[in-house]
Amino acid sequence: MVSNAAKEVFIQGMTREGKTFRPSDWAERLAGVMSQFRPGGAHPGSHLSYSPWCIPTTVAGVKCVVVHSDLRDAEPMAWDFCMNFARDNHLQVYEACLLPDPPRS
């Protein structure tokens, strides 16, 4: 269960049973479906980039999708879709905060 206070939720590509979720591009697919949900709404060409509210990434070698709470506020059905996807596929979900990469020297 995700609290309403969470700013970011990580959907991990690892099932509650500890198995890697397949297909291997699931995170990019989910984020691609969510690409139209963004600040200011969809616009021409927005399908060519990920929404800042639903970003695929890798954490400690595990594929993840970071879903920001602004998605829940702007598009509750899109938020529910992401959370139901995680639940239906038995994926691990964590509340966390994505930190920016350190500057390169």
Image: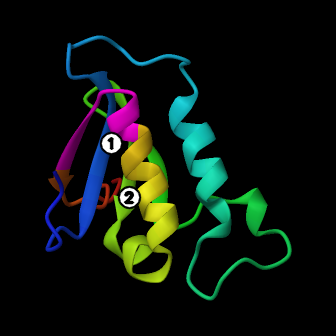
Q: Nearer the viewer, residue 98 or 7?
A: 7
Residue 91: in magenta span? yes
User: Is 94 situated above or below 24?
Assistant: below
Tell whether label 1 touches label 2 (CB within 8 Å).
yes
The stretch of residues the image draws in magenta is 86-94
Residue 36 position in % (x across, y down): 68, 67
Specify the quadrant that holds the C terminus.
bottom left
Q: Secondary structure at mark 2?
A: strand
Return the residue found at the far right: 44
Residue 22 position in % (x across, y down): 49, 16
Q: Residue at x 35, y 53 (%)?
A: 104
Question: How many badges with numbers are in the image?
Answer: 2
Residue 45: in magenta span? no
Crowd around label 2: few <14 · some 14–19 · many ≥20 (10 Å):
many
Return the residue found at the far bottom: 40
Question: Which picture quadrant has residue 100?
Answer: bottom left
User: Is 26 situated above or below 21?
Assistant: below
Residue that mark 2 sits on? 67
